[in-house]
Image: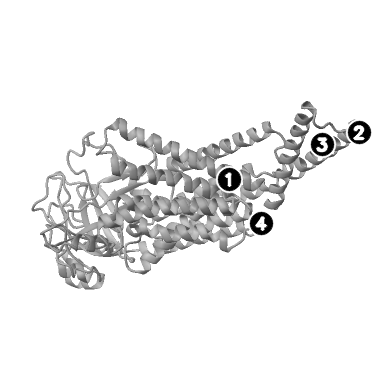
Amino acid sequence: MDERDRKAAQARARRVGEFRAELDALAGEGVLELPAEEGARVRAHHDRLLAELQERFDVDVSEAQRRFSWGMRIVATLGSAALAAAVYLFFDRIWGSLATAAQVGLLTAAPVAAVAAMEWTSRRERTYWFTGLFGALAFACAVVDLNVLGMTFDLQSTPLAFVVWAAFALSLAYAYGLRSLLAAGLVCAGIGAPGLVAKLSGVDWQSATQRAELWLLPAAATFAWPFVVRHRAHVHFPAVYRLTGAVAAFAAVFLLAHWGRDSFLPFGRETVEALYAYGGLVAAAGVVALGVRRDLRESVYAGTGFFAVFLYDRMFDWWWDRMPRYLFFLVVGAVAVALLLLLTRLRLRAVRGAR
Amino acid sequence: MRRIGPWLAAALVVLANGWIAVVGTLGGLVNHEVVAVLTERELPVVDRSATPGGGGALALQLRFREPPAGSVLDRATLERLGFDCGVPAADPRAERHYARQLPRPGYAVLAIEEAGAQPEESRLVVVDAGPDADALLRRHPPVSGHLVLPAIFAVSANGEEDVVGRVLRLARRELHVPARLASRLRAPSDRDVSGPARPRHDVVLGFGRDGGLRILDVRPSAPAGDTMTPAGDPGPEPGCAPAPDP
């Protein structure tokens, strides 16, 4: 099923619901009431349309269904975590009594069986609840698989494992349109790619991937990727790319603003920390501006959240030791009010623009 | 399956596992020329079970002592390992210069030294290091009982002292215990909750073709406890020694 079609179907179903509610409101206020025959025709048409959309795309046609969908998302997440834990603990229980060949066989079979279960369920459902659940289980099995095999054969750790996990998660994410697997694959790729470069450069790859400055390039590339490559079949994926990239980049900047000693920049520690602290503020504001201009909701959320984090971090750094505590929190509260006023004005401007 | 993604994912798992199994099996074929016998002081048991006392795999953690600062990892050795030691430690730029340098892989030579070891402490100590395993093996031939192991090295500068190098960790910190030997390590012992009353097992080690250590045998320690003995000879002769081909 094309993700675009499902998204369009969900949007249409939502519009129908809003249209009906508004029509009822207008009738109640005595502004507009459709003639009985036309009203019945419109209602019958919408009923048929909603039934068809639900049949073909399993969309939510009511507020109650939307709430159920959120509940199902939470249950699916918890379920996949519980299943992964069950598989891991079962293996753990029997592991010591198995021969090496049996261990290799089991470790290979577990993720392959989970992938087969994904394919089987995907042919029997339209919203991929169970497919997503088995997808998370397959990824967990693949991670456990390489980890345990590496330990069993006493192999040295390698960034290639992250590359394999990234390829595994991304191939399943694109096959079934699963956002959680896309995020997992991007994180693994963000560790594996710089790890490989570090290993080829002759330095310890594990230490390299712990240096926050080396996260910046993969994070920026992840954020920029959907601006370069269009995702026509997976319309939800660009938001995942941008959110993953933004969170990784801002987390790196935040760490460097506090532990500048590990920076590769040719400046003193204080200069490096100040650069990243103020650079983080500017970058977060830039991401918010980009998000508002291009209507990218996740970028606005990530940018606003990290702007607040960087700003409060700066205030703590400036004033915590110099002010009485009550005054410090008063200033923080005042800044929050000022930010709220600023965001309200921006929101009003956006509403006027929409009109 | 109509999609290519699941096929690709399944193929990745099978290929990666096959590659690990082949590389691991071939690399793990033990070269019996070099065998060292170490006790629980150097190789304490690590239970990899998620739940205490579970049936999971066991491993032995290789523990060693750092040599005194500057004695082994001096400036020349650190430069051979690839570190840029051009800035004197007393230079104001030194802290940042050395902090910028990432840890680097190389090889550490470990040998048994009783002197300076506390009763529960590992007697393995780093006696040499370098970037080339073959050169180190020529300098410390296996028959001398030295262990040449891949390790990660780091460098730093602390004020007036000279540039300080250290072994950040061994590349393989834990050795997998084969299932056939695990039961001997699980057996009840005189160990109490606060730690081993005395070392209770000796482990016979061999080098695999990939240069990594492998566990060949596990046997109860001699009554005297913390002794190092050649494989096949349970006598109390101390030292890390080569063993006859079994």
A179 relative position to A124: left or right: left
Residue A234 appears in which quarter of the rendering? bottom right
Q: Give the class, few, some or many, for how many residues have Cα within 10 Å of label 1's Cα (few <14, many ≥20).
A: few
Label whose residue precedes the other's in the sequence (1 or 2): 2
Residue at the location (29% across, 40% down)? Answer: A319
Residue pointed to by mark 2 = A37
Task: Find out whether the residues at labels 3 and 2 contact each other: C-beta distance under 8 Å.
Answer: no
Examine the rendering and report whether any part of residue A142 can be seen.
no
| x, y percent for residue B224 | 13, 45
Q: Residues within 10 Å of mark 4 (few under 14, many from 20)?
A: some
Residue corresponding to mark 3 = A47
Q: Amino acid at mark 1?
A: Arg
Q: Upstream in the sequence, badge 2 or badge 4?
A: 2
Q: What residue type is disc 4 on?
A: Ala
Query: What distance separates the C-alpha of mark 1 from that of mark 3?
Result: 37 Å
Q: Position of residue B139 (x, y in %)?
A: 17, 71
Tell which circle, 3 or 2, labels the residue nearer the N-terminal end: 2
Q: Amino acid at mark 3?
A: Asp
Pointer 4: what residue? Answer: A233
- What chain letter is assigned to the residue under label 2? A
Q: Is residue A319 above or below residue A220?
A: above
Task: Determine the CA span between mark 2 and mark 4.
Answer: 40 Å
Relative to residue B221, is residue A234 depicted above or below?
below
Which label sits in the foreground, 1 or 3? Answer: 1
Relative depth, front residue between A153 and B243: A153
The answer to which of marks 1 and 4 sits earlier in the sequence is: 4
The mark nearer the N terminus, 1 or 3, is 3
Badge 2: how crowded within 10 Å, few (<14), some, or many (20+)? few
Give the chain letter at badge 1. A
Q: Which residue is mark 1?
A: A349
Subunit that carries the residue with mark 3: A
